[in-house]
Image (cartoon, rainbow, N blue to C red):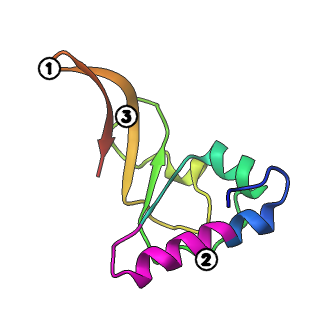
Amino acid sequence: CSWTQGNNETNCQFIKKLVDEIQARGRSVGIYASHYMWLQILGAVDKCNIFTTIPIWYAHYDKVQNFDDWQTNKFGGWTVPTLKQYAGDSPVCGFKVDLSYY
């Protein structure tokens, strides 16, 4: 199984099955996505608003360590994000890493 380009409802149900299975196994789960990803996979920022009880970790590479951008980048029905990935390929101790704010 995988997501299907252009079939937004099927994609939402696929993600729901993944989340349900993880939770059924007693594990914690969250969603990692960006505004752009949500649009591409689910068709609109206001689609598939069924995950708001689990954490959202969103990617917006603006190099700013705060959630001030969430109001213009929000999607999926979440009102408050849990984490933000604000920079990618940042040098730390000789390695390139992505940086997140929480």
Q: Secondary structure at mark 3?
A: loop
Q: Are marks 1 and 2 in contact (CB under 8 Å)?
A: no
Residue at image location 71% in from the left, 56% down from the top = 3
Q: Residue at x 72, y 63 (%)?
A: 11
- In this rendering, the label closer to the viewer, 2 or 3: 2
Residue designated by label 3: 64
Left or right, 36 with reference to 27: right
Residue situated furthest left in the rendering: 93
Q: Amino acid at mark 1?
A: Cys
Q: Main secondary structure of the magenta part?
A: helix
Could you tell me residue 4's position as x and y percent? 78, 54
Where is residue 57? Give x, y as percent: 43, 54
Left or right: 78 with respect to 13? left
* Magenta stretch encompasses residue 17: yes
Please tell me which residue lies in front, 72 or 96: 96
Q: Residues within 10 Å of mark 1 (few under 14, many from 20)?
A: few
- Residue 15, position in %: x, y? 61, 66
Q: Is residue 23 above or below residue 10?
A: below
Image quarter (top left, top right, bottom left or bottom right) of the N terminus: bottom right
Q: Name the amino acid type tagged 3.
A: Val
**Sequence order check, earlier mark of 1 and 2:** 2
**Residue bounds of the magenta highlight:** 14-29
Residue 16 among magenta residues: yes
Q: Where is mark 2, residue-wise? A: 50
Which numbered dot is residue 93?
Answer: 1
